[in-house]
Every structure is written in structure tokens, then in C-alpha cells.
Amino acid sequence: MNTRQDLLPILQAVRAYVPRLILEQVLAAPDVEQAGREERFAGAVLFADVSGFTAMSESLAQLGKEGAEELTRVLNRYFSTMIEIVEQFDGQVIKFGGDAITCAFISDDAQGEGVLRAGACGLAMAAGRSSCG
């Protein structure tokens, strides 16, 4: 039987790698099996990726190791900026895939508040991408 106290050190160790939504669910019900679990909620999901990423990565690949390092720096700047923007709109990053980011904006109501936050976040992300280099 797991208790919240038993789980805290484990969750602390993995919190950088697990969406906040999942951590909150585990803490709320430590005895409930989480694998394969589904839950419905009001909100919105936002998908974003780097425009022109394939061309940029192919161009940088021609530079060898230096190009790979530059690509890593560009992606790190991009994701750091995008994560900050998502958090400003009370969103949660739930997945990274290559140059893409998936975010959830959960609402306490079904009136579209999460959708509005996701839309505003998307606009802020578009405006903020110029600061990523």
C-alpha cells in the first residue's frame, strides 16, 4: 500500500520528466493503479512545432559536430521559451516529440476557459518564437 509520504521521494526524482497532471493524479490517489487509466476533463490541447525545422537541421547537419551542437542550442532555447509561455497561461507540457511540443489547458468548467488560455498561449508562442534565435 502506497501512501503520499512513500511516493514523495519518487515523485520528486521524476518530476522533471512527468507531466504535472500525472503527478497530481498520483498524489491525489496513491493507491489507485494509474497505468491504462483514462479521465475526461474540460479543456484544450495545443500542438506546436518549429517551422522550417527540417531544412534547418539538414543545413546544420552539413557542419558536422558543430552543427549538431548548434541545433541542440536552438532547440533548448526554443523549448525553454515555449515552456515559460505555456506556464504563464497555466498550461501543462505533456509531451515533446522531436521539434514538437504538446500542451494541455485544463478547465474547471465547460465554458471554454481552457480553450481561451490555449488560444492566447498559441498567440504568445508565435510572438515569442523570434526571441529563440
Image (cartoon, rainbow, N blue to C red):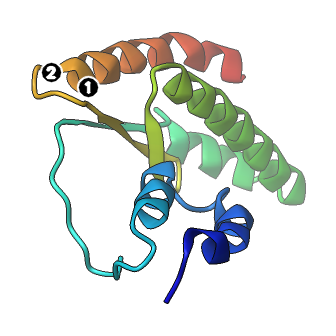
For badge 2, the amino acid type reads Gly
The residue at the point 62 percent across, 14 percent down is 130
Q: Residues within 10 Å of mark 1 (few under 14, many from 20)?
A: many
Q: Are marks 2 and 1 in contact (CB under 8 Å)?
A: yes
Q: Residues within 10 Å of mark 2 (few under 14, many from 20)?
A: some
**Which residue is nearer to you in this view: 87 or 3?**
3
**Which residue is nearer to you in this view: 58 or 35?**
35
Q: Which quadrant, please, contains the C terminus?
A: top right
Q: Is residue 105 above or below residue 129?
A: below
Q: Is residue 23 above or below residue 88?
A: below
> Residue 7, image x and y in percent?
62, 74
> Residue 62, image x and y in percent?
75, 53
**Which residue is nearer to you in this view: 94 or 126?**
94
The residue at the point 46 percent across, 26 percent down is 90
Q: Is residue 30 above or below residue 62?
A: below
Is residue 118 visible to us here?
yes
> Residue 15, image x and y in percent?
65, 59
Q: Determine which quarter of the picture holds residue 68.
A: bottom right
Specify whether 70 is left or right of 4.
right
Residue extending farthest to the right is 66
Q: SS at mark 1?
A: helix
Q: Is residue 58 above or below residue 39?
A: above
Specify whether 115 is left or right of 133.
left
Per the image, the residue denoted by label 1 is 114
Per the image, the residue denoted by label 2 is 112
Residue 54 is labelled as none
For badge 1, the amino acid type reads Gly
Q: Determine which quarter of the picture holds residue 87.
A: top right
